[in-house]
């Protein structure tokens, strides 16, 4: 195996571009020897692997738990809509995962899963990385890609009354949606308090009167 | 001689010689209202940073009677919206406006509150006048504190043109009371 960049535990030396591409190539080769992989033809600046949907969970677990690689940080999960994208063939959607190692400076890797429009489901990674919980909710919110096994597949950014997925290329950017109420998010707060050992004597009430009462009250 | 003067602590002869002035009810009420605007800051973005300097010693907004910042809409009569309002925020803003008791006025501060600013997208309200009535708009991104003062002075001018009795009559009619025209 080739050298894999600086070990952060020994010296704080930033990785060079050559180190990074070398590490990416060796990671790719290592994965290709174990799983069916494709190289992403659209990735111009780095080596990116396209994995099959059913292998995703295993691949990520292998990347995280193999000590030579130690991709122990999930930076982000990104949804992509390839509608009308020049040079793209195949399924319309893709989900990209960005990984980084907190141990080796040169270790950065990108995985991609192609998702067909007919079957918008990807396995969830929330059991491997806590950050995947919210990142997957964001992708669901903006692209409508569902994550199988996710504990709380709710919208993250948009309101629960919002209809559609705004970062899809066929969503009209100027389309506005009026909402009737606020989105209190108390369910998560209460769950977090209980998790931290707090006991809620009474669930927090929404202590606001109905809008109609307020209008009448202000006119008296 | 009216009963009030008879019962006043000032002796009758003396009271008759005291100077007095006549005015209209509207003038007195508007004088009070326009010089004691209590603002409620609805701050969502960078315009609120300018508001901080406006309230502090250098610009001293209190000179114009907007002395008392209140953080509950029930005790304030001037709603200042400083910053971008998203559709998610819109029902909250609407509810805050409805919790304010009349008389109430609204200043939309800066490009975002006035028109959505450069956020021409699915999530930003293109101007808060889509949600609530606005009295004064301030341009700028963010406006200078002097612009806030200008807006407050213009609002005071506007309040001085209002009529308490006409307003009250309209409110009673809204409630469905049968009144002579």
Image (cartoon, rainbow, N blue to C red):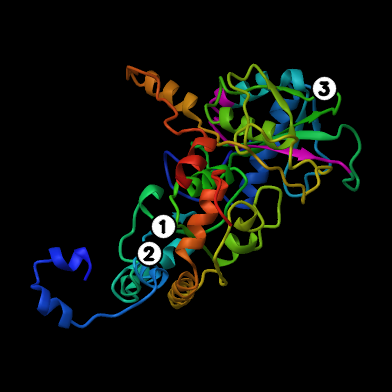
Q: Is residue B45 visible?
A: no
Residue in the picture at 67% in, 57% down: B126
Which label number is shown at residue A119? 3
Magenta-tinted stretch:
A64-83
In x, y percent, where is residue A71?
57, 31
Q: Is residue B141 magenta?
A: no
Horizontal side, residue A55 vs residue B165: left or right: right
- In the image, B166 versus A193, the foreground residue is B166
Residue in the picture at 89% in, 41% down: A88
Residue at mark 2 shares a chain with residue at mark 3: no
Helix, strand or loop at mark 3: loop
Which residue is disc 2 drawn over?
Answer: B37
Which residue is disc 1 drawn over?
Answer: B77
In x, y percent, where is residue B22?
33, 78
In x, y percent, where is residue A9?
42, 38
Quadrant of residue A195 in the image?
Answer: top left
- Chain holding disc 3: A
Q: Nearer the viewer, mark 3 or mark 1?
A: 1
Sequence-first tag of 2 and 1: 2
Q: Is residue A80 visible?
A: yes
Q: Is residue A67 magenta?
A: yes
Horizontal side, residue A138 vs residue B96: left or right: right
Task: Pick the quarter of the image with the C terminus of chain A.
Answer: top left
- Chain holding disc 1: B
Residue in the picture at 67% in, 34% down: A141
Few, some or many residues within 10 Å of mark 1 (<14, 14–19, 20+): many
- In the image, B98 versus B107, the foreground residue is B98
Q: CA distance from mark 2 to mark 1?
A: 6 Å
**Residue at the far front in the pictured view:** B1
Helix, strand or loop at mark 1: loop
């Amino acid at each position: 195996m080739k050298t894999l960049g600086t070990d952060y535990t020994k010296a704080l030396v930033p990785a060079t571009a050559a180190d990074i591409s070398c590490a990416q190539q060796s990671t790719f080769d290592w994965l290709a020897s174990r799983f069916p992989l494709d190289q992403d033809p659209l990735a111009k600046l780095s080596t990116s692997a396209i994995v099959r949907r059913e292998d995703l969970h295993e691949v990520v677990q292998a990347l995280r738990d193999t000590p030579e690689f130690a991709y122990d940080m999930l930076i982000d999960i990104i949804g992509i809509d390839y509608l009308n994208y020049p040079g793209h063939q195949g399924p319309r959607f893709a989900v990209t995962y960005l990984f980084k190692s907190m141990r080796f400076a040169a270790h950065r890797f990108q995985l991609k899963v192609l998702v067909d429009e007919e079957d918008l489901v990807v396995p969830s990674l929330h059991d491997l990385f806590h950050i995947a919980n919210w990142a997957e909710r964001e992708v669901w919110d903006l692209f409508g890609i569902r994550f199988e096994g996710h504990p709380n597949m709710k919208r993250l950014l948009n309101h629960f009354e919002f209809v559609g997925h705004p970062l899809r290329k066929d969503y009209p950017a100027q389309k506005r949606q009026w909402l009737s109420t606020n989105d209190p998010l108390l369910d998560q707060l209460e769950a977090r308090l209980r998790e931290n050992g707090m006991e809620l004597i009474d669930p927090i009430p929404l202590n606001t009167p109905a809008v109609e009462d307020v209008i009448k009250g202000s006119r008296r | 001689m009216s009963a009030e003067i008879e019962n006043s602590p000032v002796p009758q002869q003396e009271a008759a010689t005291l100077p007095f002035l006549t005015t209209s009810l509207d003038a007195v009420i508007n004088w009070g209202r326009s010089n004691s605007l209590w603002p409620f800051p609805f701050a969502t973005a960078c315009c609120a940073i300018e508001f901080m300097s406006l309230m502090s010693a250098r610009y001293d907004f209190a000179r114009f009677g907007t002395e008392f910042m209140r953080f509950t809409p029930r005790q304030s009569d001037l709603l200042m919206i400083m910053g971008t309002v998203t559709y998610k925020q819109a029902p909250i803003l609407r509810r805050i406006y409805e919790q304010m008791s009349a008389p109430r006025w609204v200043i939309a501060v800066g490009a975002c509150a006035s028109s959505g600013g450069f956020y021409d997208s699915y999530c930003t309200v293109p101007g808060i006048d889509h949600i609530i009535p606005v009295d004064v708009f301030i341009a700028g991104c963010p406006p200078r504190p002097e612009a806030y003062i200008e807006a407050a002075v213009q609002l005071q001018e506007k309040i001085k043109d209002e009529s308490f009795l006409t307003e009250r009559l309209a409110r009673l009619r809204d409630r469905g009371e049968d009144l002579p025209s």
